[in-house]
Amino acid sequence: MSTTEQRVAIVTGAARGIGAATAVRLAAEGRAVAALDLSEEACAGTVEQITAAGGRALAVGCDVADAEQVTSAVARVAAELGPPEILVNNAGVLRDNLLFRMSESDWDTVMNVHLRGAFLMTRACQSHMVDAGFGRVVSLSSTSALGNRGQVNYAAAKAGIQGFTKTLAKELGKFGITANAVAPGFIATEMTAQTADRLGVTFDDLQQAAAQEIPVRRVGRPEDVAAAIAFFTGEEAGFVSGQVLYVAGGPLS
Ligand code: NAD
């Protein structure tokens, strides 16, 4: 690849929240971006924001937990934008419940989207990265990986992402591919708004309470996480691999 060619990035869960901010940020850094989410229509806003700023973007509908959909989505990106050399495994869901109330479906849904999804997407993209001799995989973990009440499913999946990432770093490093994880704390998105609903408090109150516990005295924004992801995807980050970067407004106590 010549240095004037644009690298192609896929961001999963890019219809809103952290994924949308990441897609916009990577496009601002000159990447062509496939914004992938459950439906193509849901990604229209993200794609419009990128193209209005002069970037190249493609909306792709795909359930990351479905192997056939993942294979065709990655093939479509390769055909319409170019071979993907950057992958951000960001798609996620919550199915919070205390253990005794957690259903098998709550468990399976979270495992399927976060872990099976990251596995399928990375497996589908890796041959393009190996061919290019360059690749960047960034997967979303969470401070919940360290344990969080009501989230045995999510905590296990987000801890799993860390083991997945370190193993990818060991297997794929010799092909010029790095793998890192970003582990956010409280970020104001639809996901944390859902948590406020579940707890029966307003989203404002939840954010204010969370901010009191965070050393920088504010909750995170999707752009805070996008900036960390952008670092790991950069051309100059090739010697940083297998790391977990907590983006949480302070150290973890
Ligand atoms: P969000 O709910 O706002 O967005 C998640 C996106 O993923 C949605 O657009 C949704 O449609 C998409 N998605 C869900 N299932 C999918 C599937 N099967 N296939 C494709 N797309 C799918 O969430 P967010 O807060 O932006 O979170 C993004 C990532 O960051 C998630 O992995 C989440 O676990 C992680 N995270 C978020 C926080 C936070 O405080 N918001 C903290 C730590 C980690």
Image (tube, grey):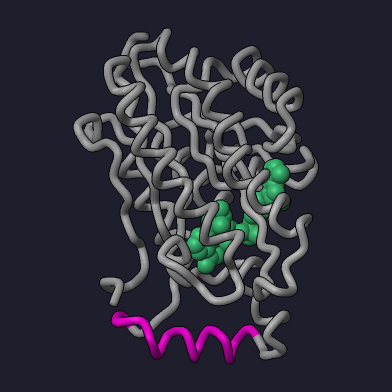
Name the quadrant of the C terminus.
bottom left
Residue 247's place in the image compared with 69, above or below, is: below
Residue 210 belongs to the span the image colors magenta: yes
Q: Look at the image and tell me whether residue 43 can be seen.
A: no
- The one of 218 and 247 positioned closer to us in this rendering: 247
For residue 1, side relative to residue 128 (left or right): left
For residue 163, side relative to residue 191 (left or right): left
Q: Look at the image and tell me whether residue 115 can be seen.
A: yes
State the residue at coordinates (70%, 74%): 100
- The one of 149 and 120 positioned closer to us in this rendering: 149
Name the quadrant of the N terminus.
top left
The percent position of residue 143, horizontal first and vertical second, equals: 42, 65
- The magenta span reads 203-216
Ligand 1's image quarter is: bottom right
Helix, strand or loop for the magenta stretch, by majority: helix
The percent position of residue 133, horizontal first and vertical second, equals: 34, 12
State the residue at coordinates (31%, 54%): 245
Residue 13's place in the image compared with 154, above or below, is: above
Question: Total number of numbered labels?
Answer: 0
The percent position of residue 66, horizontal first and vertical second, equals: 74, 32
Q: Quadrant of residue 197?
A: bottom right
The percent position of residue 148, horizontal first and vertical second, equals: 50, 72
State the residue at coordinates (66%, 67%): 190
For residue 234, side relative to residue 48 (left or right): left
Residue 125 belongs to the span the image colors magenta: no
State the residue at coordinates (72%, 51%): 109
Q: Quadrant of residue 168?
A: top left
Residue 24's place in the image compared with 66, above or below, is: below
